[in-house]
């Protein structure tokens, strides 16, 4: 059994995740987010809360995307010769 499977059982996870769920949900819901972000509204105290809610992607509030690498692929990368 792989470590990921053990952790899923231990944490009672019912669905395996590839680490990208947060990125799939990260989007702008406002129509002018890109323009507002370029004009600095993401950093203005008065607008930060609404910009975080409506313009998550344009303001850069999305969680980092974690790349899922299988055990075999990770082993291949670790054992590959340096060029």
Image (cartoon, rainbow, N blue to C red):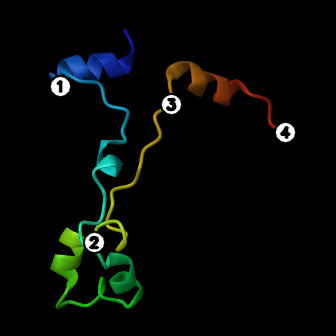
Mark number displayed over residue 55 = 2
Q: Where in the figure is residue 8, as x and y percent of width and height? A: 24, 22
What residue is shown with label 4? 83
Q: Where in the figure is residue 46, as x and y percent of width and height? A: 17, 91
How many residues crowd mark 3 within 10 Å: few (<14), some (14–19), many (20+)?
few
Gap in angstroms between the C-alphas marked 1 and 4: 40 Å
What residue is shown with label 1? 11
Mark number displayed over residue 69 = 3
Work out whether mark 2 precedes mark 3 in sequence or the reverse, and give the earlier one.
Answer: 2
Q: Where in the figure is residue 25, as x and y percent of width and height? A: 27, 51
Work out whether mark 1 precedes mark 4 in sequence or the reverse, and give the earlier one.
Answer: 1
How many residues crowd mark 4 within 10 Å: few (<14), some (14–19), many (20+)?
few
Gap in angstroms between the C-alphas marked 3 and 4: 21 Å
Residue at x 21% of width, y 82% of height: 48
> What is the secondary structure assignment of the residue under circle 3?
loop
Work out whether mark 4 precedes mark 2 in sequence or the reverse, and give the earlier one.
Answer: 2
Compared to residue 75, the image places residue 28 above or below, namely: below
Q: Quadrant of the N terminus?
A: top left
Q: Where in the figure is residue 49, as x and y percent of width and height? A: 16, 78
Q: Quadrant of the C terminus?
A: top right
Is there CB contact under 8 Å for labels 2 and 1? no
Q: Nearer the viewer, residue 82 or 58?
A: 58
């Amino acid at each position: 059994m792989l470590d990921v499977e053990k952790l899923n059982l231990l944490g009672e996870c019912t669905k395996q995740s590839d680490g990208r769920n947060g990125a799939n949900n990260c989007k702008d819901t406002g129509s002018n987010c890109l323009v507002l972000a370029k004009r600095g509204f993401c950093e203005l105290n008065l607008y930060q809360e609404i910009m975080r809610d409506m313009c998550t992607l344009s303001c850069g509030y999305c969680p980092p995307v974690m790349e899922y690498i299988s055990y075999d692929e990770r082993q291949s990368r670790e054992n590959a010769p340096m060029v």
